[in-house]
Image: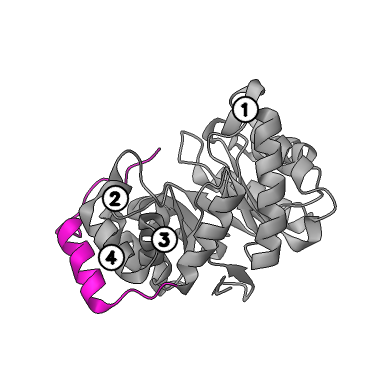
Amino acid sequence: MRSVTLTTGEKVPVLGLGTWRMGERKSERGAELKAIKLGLELGIELGMTLIDTAEMYGSGRAEEIVGEAAAGQRDKLFIVSKVLPYNASRNGVIDACERSLKRLKTDRLDLYLLHWRGSVPLAETIEAFMRLQRDGKIRHHGVSNFDLDDMQEWVALAGGETVAANQILYNLQRRGPEWKLIPWCRERRIAIMAYTPLGQGRMLQHKALGEIASRHEATPAQVALAWLLRQDGMIVIPKASRQEHVRDNRGALDLRLTPDDIAALDRAFPPPKGPSALGML
């Protein structure tokens, strides 16, 4: 398993497990718990020990599922969660983190992110993150859905310079961050976490992905993941609702795209020619 080195020197896997949209339907809880448990067991075996969740997902139920699935495996995992903007005040972050820790059945988060920017001053959120780190409740802090202006403002604040990651919507169809945001973060060794890496809708049915997959005896999803994973400082968190998805996703790490493959993907999914909106799901 390849890794990304955070600003603290800690290495984390480049490929993890996502839980977006889990916990939304009580009728599916049993199936989701089984999928996450099996996914974590296989993920640990394959080196995919990072799992991403948030208090927003299923109104906390996704965290509960992860906590139950991770029983007995906590020390082998790198757990990421996120605080909602309306909980991002000086005291709100502390309380939200305590609730997440309880749902996840753990005493600390490895990475805690501000889910997106809201109306609370960023300085308040950073102050709370620093307090949580001092108290051992979180090990690293970061942000999500931040554009370049937001990032520049964050790192200029006291404590903000230690930001570990920015989790953003990034895939072959959504390449806007390549214009300025990703290069800026890379220069400062701020990890990029790509969510929804397989896009939505019909992206995986694109002819170019199918042709490249055929040449490499791979799947279109593996090609889309390999395109992201080839980039320095990139952590990719596809949702894995079935055990076979975890193994297939891991296979993307063994896929080496050629310059001709990259050129074909650039023709099919053109890179940005100028600034564009970051986008968010």
Q: Magenta part of the protein: which range?
A: 255-281
- Three-letter amino acid code at disc 3? Gln
What residue is disc 3 on? Answer: 222
Pick whichever, 231 or 39, lies toward us.
39
- Taking the spot 33% from the left edge, 68% from the top edge, the residue there is 183
Separation of residues labelled 3 and 2 (CA atoms): 17 Å
First in sequence: mark 2 vs mark 4 = 2
Q: Could you say where residue 111 lies in the image, as x and y percent from the top left?
A: 63, 55
- Three-letter amino acid code at disc 1? Ser
Q: Was residue 36 drawn as part of the magenta stretch in this picture?
A: no
First in sequence: mark 3 vs mark 1 = 1
What residue is disc 2 on? Answer: 174
Which marked residue is nearer to the observer: mark 3 or mark 2? 3
Quick check: 51 above or below 115? Answer: below
Pick whichever, 132 or 246, lies toward us.
246
- Residue 12 visible: yes
Q: Quadrant of the N terminus?
A: bottom right
Quick check: 136 above or below 68? Answer: below
Q: Is 154 situated left or right of 202 in this image?
A: right
